[in-house]
Image: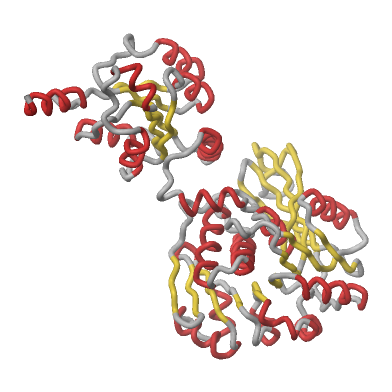
């Protein structure tokens, strides 16, 4: 991943502008049985092949985009959005800009209006000259085919000498254009249409044979299946699926930039599947960032995180209506009382964050002989518990700051506390923002202090 920044990827295909009109719905129209949307806001996103270029840029690559637009206001909006993202583009403007406008009421998409022109399009000699230069110097070429006319026999013939660099997001109607390219990435439905069979593995082998290319078939919530020298299944990494629009763009971007960074095809597929896992958890088309991808790949091992990472995660979970539970403690010598407590805390919400007293904090609380285990060891042990989602180490007295900034839905305390004996400043903060405080009684005769006393007696 450290090699991702600066990799040069040429993106060619059907560029689009996506428009979103959001509003509220409280009644139906007297003119027809349809909802009336009261306008609230409108915004635009880069769509089609442009979204692929946007994902490449977010992952640290240098994307150069080729496509067709019109001499219209939509083209100007699209160009401004690309410039904001730092994406270089070369457009022939002898067509109509493909524009998709979505009407959304109360968070639910009601309808979509498409404006497009789908006849075959041929790049001008001037654009081809630039394309050839960029193709010569780039690390990979990705073709994003939405069957709107940008991907043609003329284009694939022109790029013939670069076939070993080319990755394609295909459309079945254009399968005759693809033979011999490095990699083709259809979804399951497209693979069935392109191969003429309706079994995934059979389709995989048929496409590999017919097109003489490496093949990756996307399988939705079942992940992806890859056939290069051998057949490999990569399971999905999505935690929840909110929106699949633009997911393949995230996949192609991560695969292309990983291959450009000397990964194997199998490794690139794993990168791509992680990127998809992030993208489908967001609403609308989404550009996955380098930092998000890094965190997702290592998240299983890296539950221990810094505050800024935690704050961003909590904000995202709250947008998804997830209930955040916070608890904190020393967790010095982990025992069954701790495990029971943490299990019960997890059941109070969707995401359990454990604040862990630093070594210095425990010394101030417990005295010079503590902790027995270092903060790194304690964090490692807590991270191994499946019901603990995140661990953050804090300094003495800092819990109130975390509660104020994160505003967890539930603040859990254990031991012999009651609502009157917990830290009253922490209590006021939680009550002020409307959070819930829950006291979980201790398991009798289970405590770190008692465990230490028991050991000391045996040593006497």
Q: Quadrant of the N terminus?
A: bottom right
Q: Nearer the viewer, residue 311 or 102?
A: 311
Q: Residue at x 44, y 11 (%)?
A: 425
Q: Is residue 114 above or below residue 199?
A: above
Q: Position of residue 398 (x, y in %)?
A: 46, 20
- Quarter the C terminus occupies: top left
Left or right: residue 306 compared with residue 357: right
Q: Position of residue 323 (x, y in %)?
A: 44, 34
Q: In this picture, is 261 found above or below 392?
A: below
Q: Residue at x 44, y 74 (%)?
A: 232
Give the residue displayed 86% in from the left and 57% down from the top. 75
Q: Is residue 8 above or below residue 202?
A: above
Quadrant in the picture for residue 175: bottom right
State the residue at coordinates (72%, 63%): 48
Instruction: Name the outermost residue toward the front.
Output: 460
Whether residue 52 sits left or right of residue 280 in the image: it is: right
Q: Farthest residue in the bottom direction?
A: 210
Q: Tell me residue 305's x, y (percent).
A: 47, 39
- Pick the residue in front: 27 or 426: 426
Q: Taking the image as drawn, is residue 142 in sight?
A: no
């Amino acid at each position: 991943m450290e090699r991702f920044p600066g990799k040069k990827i040429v993106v060619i295909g059907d560029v689009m502008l996506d428009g979103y009109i959001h509003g509220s719905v409280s009644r139906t129209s007297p003119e027809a049985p349809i909802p009336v949307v009261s306008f609230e806001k409108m915004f635009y996103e880069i769509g089609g092949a442009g979204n692929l270029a946007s994902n490449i840029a977010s992952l640290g690559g240098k994307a150069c985009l080729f496509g067709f637009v019109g001499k219209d206001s939509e083209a100007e909006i699209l160009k401004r959005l690309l410039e904001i993202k730092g994406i270089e583009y070369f457009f022939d403007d002898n067509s109509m800009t493909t524009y998709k406008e979505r009407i959304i009421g109360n968070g639910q998409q009601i309808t979509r209006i498409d404006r497009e022109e789908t006849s075959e399009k041929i790049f001008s000699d001037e654009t081809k000259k630039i394309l050839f230069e960029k193709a010569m110097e780039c690390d990979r070429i990705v073709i994003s085919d939405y069957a709107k006319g940008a991907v043609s026999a003329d284009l694939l013939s022109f790029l013939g000498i670069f076939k070993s660099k080319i990755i394609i997001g295909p459309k079945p109607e254009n399968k005759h254009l693809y033979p011999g390219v490095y990699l083709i990435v259809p979804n399951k439905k497209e693979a069935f249409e392109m191969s003429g069979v309706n079994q995934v593995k059979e389709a995989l082998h048929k496409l590999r044979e017919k097109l003489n290319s490496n093949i990756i078939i996307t399988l939705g919530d079942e992940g992806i299946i890859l056939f290069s020298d051998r057949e490999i299944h990569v399971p999905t990494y999505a935690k929840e699926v909110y929106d699949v629009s633009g997911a393949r763009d995230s996949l192609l971007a991560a695969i292309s930039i990983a291959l450009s960074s000397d990964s194997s095809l199998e490794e690139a597929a794993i990168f791509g599947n992680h990127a998809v896992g992030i993208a489908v958890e967001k609403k609308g088309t989404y550009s996955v960032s380098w930092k998000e991808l890094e965190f997702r790949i290592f998240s299983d091992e890296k539950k221990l995180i810094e505050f800024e990472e935690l704050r961003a995660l909590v904000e995202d979970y709250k947008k998804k209506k997830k209930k955040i539970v916070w608890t904190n403690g020393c967790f010095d010598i982990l025992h069954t009382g701790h495990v029971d407590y943490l299990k019960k805390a997890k059941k109070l919400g969707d995401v359990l964050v454990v604040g862990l007293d630093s070594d210095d904090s425990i010394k101030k609380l417990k005295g010079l002989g503590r902790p027995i285990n270092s903060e790194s060891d304690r964090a490692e042990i807590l991270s191994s518990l499946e019901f603990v989602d995140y661990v953050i180490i804090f300094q003495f007295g800092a819990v109130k700051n975390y509660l104020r900034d994160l505003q967890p839905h539930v603040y859990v305390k254990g031991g012999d506390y009651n609502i009157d004996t917990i830290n009253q400043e922490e209590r006021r903060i939680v009550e002020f923002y409307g959070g819930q405080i829950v006291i979980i009684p201790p398991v009798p005769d289970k405590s770190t202090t008692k465990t230490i006393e028991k050991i000391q007696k045996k040593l006497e």
